[in-house]
Image: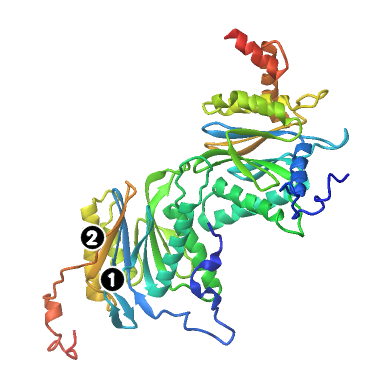
Amino acid sequence: MFRNMYDTDVTVWSPEGRLLQVEYAMESVKQGSACIALRSDTHSVIGALKRSVSELSSHQQKILEIDDHLGIGIAGLTADARTLAKWMRNECLNHKYVYGTALPSGRLVNDLADRHQRTTQTYVRRPYGVGLLVASFDKNGPHVYQTCPSGNVYECYASAIGARSQSGRTYLEKHYESFPGCDRDELIMHALKALVGCVSGDGELTSENGSVAVVGKNEKFTLIEGEALQPYLDRLELESGNNGGENVEEEQGGDAMET
Amino acid sequence: MSLSLQAGGSATRALPSAAGTTHTTSPITTGTSVLAVKYRSGVLLAADTLVSYGSMAKFKNARRLLPINSRTLIGGSGEYSDLQSVSDLLKRNALEDKCTADSLYEEENNEECAKEVWSYLRAVMYNRRSKMNPLWNDIVVAGFKQNDDGTTSDEPFLGVVDKIGTAYEDDVLATGFGGYIALPLMREKYRPDMEEGEARALLEDCLRILFYRDCRALNRVQIAKVTREGKVLVSEPYELDTFWDFKGFVDTKAGLGTDGGW
């Protein structure tokens, strides 16, 4: 089980200059189901695949609302994410009480990174085992941030985390240049297309396991799930059907041939 | 930005003890009224430069109109040392805002708008009064509102916070004795489309009247403005002309059946 003798404590360096416990925590993010986020000039969108433990249980919530202008998508330990979400909600409320305005997301995310960092330097604690995608719309416009258990924070045009997120990331990397001009629904469609690639082999993206949230200019943070998600899934099917294939990569191939 | 309201003045840690430290709960050196009015292209503030020690005119060149950041101006009456403490606090926050990048790859404006400064002051003042150790000031905050996208709005902002954290906005404001003497005059003359010259004349008239009638006022004054172009300007102190030859000022009431006073 042990990779080596330097991984039993968060604060102990390995001779190669690595903090193995922190790296293990980074791995736990990859165990969580996929989560993607992207933004245009006017909106930020999060998409996530929800898991259920069994046929008889409900799907685990993957996207959490923090405030009217901000929400998170999570991959990793859900319990850790809930702790962080609670803290983030509290920060937003405090800022609203004191300043009368929404908390700028960059500030919140930097403070969040500090919280992550503190655990990597403290003997008595463990790193949070969760990665967050933060989507927001604040006074500086739409933002997407990605946080890691290691305390790193990245601001991105688009990003994907979690299990099988690589294909989602590939999709986003391929199309991110077209995102800025997208309207709300186009951005949601991009999110779903990126998400389709992250579904495990035998499964498919449904209104049950799919989850999308959008926030943007003149729109408060809105969760789109279940029935509300169905129209978008229908459109997804229609669009991929038109291009003669369900697979996202094939669909893009079809586009390329047409033009 | 620090959310710590405890930082509201260095006297925080010296809470009035059970035994009853009371010297921080009443003012010692005080400034009198601050006047403010919105006009066509911004907000205009006015105050005199006197700080009194009780009834003694102690400091005659004290500035009570203070720029906080490039778009926000405050004017304070009441305990002058508390005003300095508040100003230090706000400037510290402004500096921190300036040094804190909200975004990792964009040039952005992190400055607080006037409304945020005003709201923050409200929280600080209320926090301090709840500890029975208030900052003894009424503070006027002037600037511009902010659009949702962070750009400065065309709409001027004018608000006041008092020593117990009561906060409200208005087109015309006056603190201290000016609330009794100048405010009714200003309300009478106020129009939203006043030119700067008009608004300035109105404020100077009010300051002059306050100098005549408020025993803690001075004719050495400052005017300050925040304009739509995002400029904050505070004038150097200058002296108002006064006229003391009114009959009522010159003639005693002797012979009118009174005791010979004015």
Q: Position of residue B205 (x, y in %)?
A: 21, 64
Considering only order in the chain, which callout, 1 or 2, is on the residue closer to the N terminus? 1
Is A16 positioned to the left or the right of B15 in the image? right
Which one is nearer the viewer's eye here, A193 or A121?
A121
Query: In the image, are marks 2 and 1 on the same chain?
Result: yes
> Which quadrant of the view contains residue B31?
bottom left
Q: Position of residue B203 (x, y in %)?
A: 25, 62
Q: Position of residue A95 (x, y in %)?
A: 56, 55
Q: Report crowding for label 2: few under 14, some 14 to 19, many 20 or more residues within 10 A (C-alpha).
A: some
Q: Nearer the viewer, mark 2 or mark 1?
A: 1
Quickly name the residue at label 2: B202
Subunit of mark 2?
B
Residue A37 appearing in the image: no
Q: How many marks?
A: 2
What amino acid type is highlighted by mark number 1? Thr
Quickly name the residue at label 1: B49
Between the residue at mark 2 and the residue at mark 1, the CA separation in whole angstroms equals: 18 Å
Is A61 positioned to the left or the right of B217 in the image? right
Q: Position of residue B114 (x, y in %)?
A: 42, 54
Q: In the image, what residue occupies the spot 25% across and 61% down?
A: B235
Q: Report crowding for label 1: few under 14, some 14 to 19, many 20 or more residues within 10 A (C-alpha).
A: many
Which one is nearer the viewer's eye here, A49 or B199?
A49
> Which quadrant of the view contains residue B163?
bottom left
State the quadrant of the C terminus of chain B: bottom left
Vertically, is B45 above or below A39? below
> Which quadrant of the view contains residue B45?
bottom left
